[in-house]
Amino acid sequence: MIYLISFTPFQPTFGLAFWSLVIFLLFWWIMSRVAFKPIAEALQKREHDIQSSLDEAKNARMEMSSMKAENDKLLAEAREQRTLILNEAKEQKAKILAEAKEQAKAESSKIMNAAQVEIEAQKKVAMQSLKADVGNMALDIAEKVIRKDLKNDSAQVSFVNTLVDEIKLN
């Protein structure tokens, strides 16, 4: 049992420690030439790529905010133009309605004037017809007066007056 207590799997001796150190330093030097530089360069490249991506993202955010501001401005202008167009359409509508009313009034005035002219013409025709009828009646009356045998002129005058009273003209 004593033998097991004194047993150590690694007993450092000077030679073993020396060659272990030499091999380790050689391995470290080879790794620094072969692996550490490319790893460090890859890490620097990755850091640079990340930084450039962050810068691009920042620029994109700034560009997006400026585009949003421009979109808001364009939207406001579009709304303003829409309001102007709607107001112009309302004005045009009111103008067209006013013109239509004026035309309707003018047309109705023309129709009324034409109707009055027609009425006047019909009235003149009726008056002429009435005058012709009155003339015919006067001739009939005169014929009757002449046929009637009257005794004196005063009786004839009174008979004509009664006939004229029966036919009053305006």
Image (tube, helix red, strand yellow):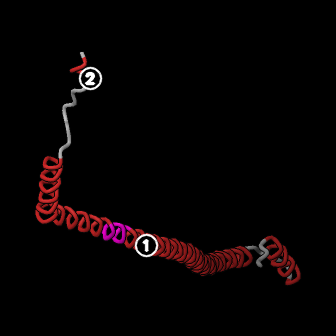
Query: Furthest-front residue in view?
Result: 2
Q: Quadrant of residue 98?
A: bottom right
Q: Residue at x 36, y 67 (%)?
A: 54
C-alpha distance separating marks 2 and 1 = 73 Å
* The C terminus - image quarter: bottom right
- Answer left or right for 126 relative to 10: right
Q: Which mark is residue 47?
A: none
Q: Which residues are magenta?
A: 51-57
**Residue 48 appears at what percent x and percent y?**
28, 70
Q: First in sequence: mark 2 or mark 1?
A: 2
Q: Which mark is residue 5?
A: 2
- Residue 58 within the magenta-colored segment of the rendering: no
* Above or below, comparing residue 25 to residue 13 in the picture: below
**Residue 78 appears at what percent x and percent y?**
47, 73
* Above or below, comparing residue 58 to residue 103 in the picture: above
Amino acid type of the residue tagged 1 in the rendering: Met
Residue that label 1 marks: 62
Q: Residue at x 16, y 59 (%)?
A: 25
- Answer left or right for 1 relative to 22: right
Amino acid type of the residue tagged 2 in the rendering: Ile
Q: Residue at x 36, y 71 (%)?
A: 55
Magenta stretch, overall SS = helix
Number of other residues with Cα within 10 Å of mark 1, as a class: few under 14, some 14 to 19, many 20 or more:
few
